[in-house]
Image: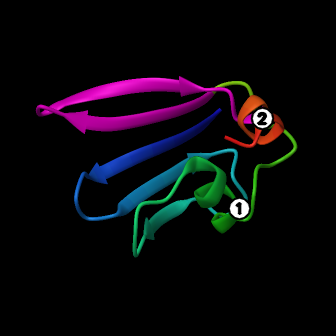
């Protein structure tokens, strides 16, 4: 599993963990999509479940969890 955690909504800072080649905190200069941020982390490892990328973001002080099918995003180019 790969997790993308949005640390602060307006800071453009995210934390990538799990089956990415270079997990860690990434500071972004502008809004960035999952299709852009995962390659910044060196891409997914061979063990990553590309159909279940977990995105966690704070909304109203609570964690909101969204599961994304990365394989479909890449295929559809969205």
Q: Secondary structure at mark 2?
A: helix
Residue 16 % position (x, y): 52, 52
Q: In front here: 18 or 71?
A: 71
User: Circles 1 and 2: CB distance less than 8 Å?
Assistant: no
Occupied quadrant, residue 13: bottom left
Q: CA distance from mark 1 to mark 2?
A: 17 Å
Image quarter where the N terminus lies is top right
Query: Is residue 2 rendered magenta in the image?
Result: no
Q: In front here: 32 or 67?
A: 32
Is 8 displayed left or right of 72 in the figure? Answer: left
Residue 74, placed above or below residue 39:
above
Residue 19, placed above or below residue 26:
above
Residue sitting at 24 percent across and 37 percent down? 58
Magenta: main secondary structure equals: strand
Residue sitting at 59 percent across and 59 percent down? 37
Residue 76 disc label = 2
Is 9 displayed left or right of 36 in the figure? Answer: left
Q: Secondary structure at mark 1?
A: helix
Residue 25 disc label = none
Q: Which residues are magenta?
A: 53-71
Residue 22 % position (x, y): 65, 64
Residue 20, placed above or below residue 49:
below
Residue 8, placed above or below residue 70:
below
For label 1, the residue is: 39
Occupied quadrant, residue 56: top left
| Within-10-Å neighbours for mark 2: few <14, some 14–19, many 20+ | few
Q: State the residue lying farthest toward the bottom.
A: 29
């Amino acid at each position: 599993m790969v997790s993308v955690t949005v640390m602060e909504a307006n800071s453009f800072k995210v934390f990538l963990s799990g089956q990415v080649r270079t997990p860690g905190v990434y500071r972004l200069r502008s809004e960035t999509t999952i299709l852009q941020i995962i390659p910044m982390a060196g891409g997914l490892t061979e063990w990553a479940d590309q159909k279940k990328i977990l995105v966690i973001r704070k909304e109203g002080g609570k964690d909101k969890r969204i599961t994304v099918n990365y394989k479909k995003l890449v295929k559809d180019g969205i």
